[in-house]
Image: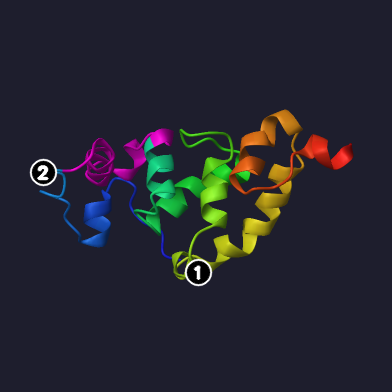
Amino acid sequence: MKPFDASKTLEDLTGFCVDGRDVAGTPLTVRINRSWKKPLRELSDDEIGRLVVQRDGFPYILDLVWPKLENDPLFDGGYYPGDILSSLIRCEPQVWAARPNYRAQLASLYQRALNREPEENEAFRASLDLPDEGAMTS
């Protein structure tokens, strides 16, 4: 994996220009397009989370979010604790083509998230339709 320059935008890195894509877009589309025009190092956690959940900006967004997930697998990208990991677990296989090392680490992150206290991982479990931890011990 070749490191990238975080002072560049997603447009710079991909060569894809989003100009005009938000003319009649939704508020979400407008926010996504603005994120594409910001240097990657200036993206907020919410912007990174939104891009991951919308499956946009890969593989560069994976490089930004992965250290956050390694630090806290229930990293909150703006929706609920564990939203990023939940979204990545449900990603299509082609998402991992450029970053197979991350795909190989998903199971470990998943297990770490499940091992957290029930009140911490409740939304994460619900997003994956997993049984409530309390229901499993009753």
Residue type (three-letter) at the residue carrying disc 1? Pro
Q: Is residue 103 above or below residue 11?
A: below
> Are the residues at dot 2 and dot 1 in contact (C-beta closer than 8 Å)?
no
| Magenta residue span | 25-46
Q: Residues within 10 Å of mark 2 (few under 14, many from 20)?
A: few
Quadrant hosting residue 137? top right
User: What residue is at 22 percent from the left and 44 percent from the top?
Assistant: 37
Q: Quadrant of the C terminus?
A: top right
Cα–Cα span, label 2 and label 1: 32 Å
Query: Secondary structure under badge 1?
Result: helix
Quadrant hosting residue 104? bottom right
Q: Is residue 44 left or right of residue 114?
A: left
Q: Nearer the viewer, residue 73 or 91?
A: 91
User: Total of numbered circles in the picture?
Assistant: 2
Residue underneath mark 1: 93
Residue 100 in the image, given as x and y percentages of width and height: 54, 68
User: What residue is at 35 percent from the left and 53 percent from the top?
Assistant: 56
Q: Earlier in the sequence, mark 2 or mark 1?
A: 2
Residue underneath mark 2: 23
Report whether residue 73 is seen. no
Q: Residues within 10 Å of mark 1 (few under 14, many from 20)?
A: few
In this rendering, the label closer to the viewer, 2 or 1: 2
Residue 42 in the image, given as x and y percentages of width and height: 33, 36
Query: Secondary structure under badge 2?
Result: loop
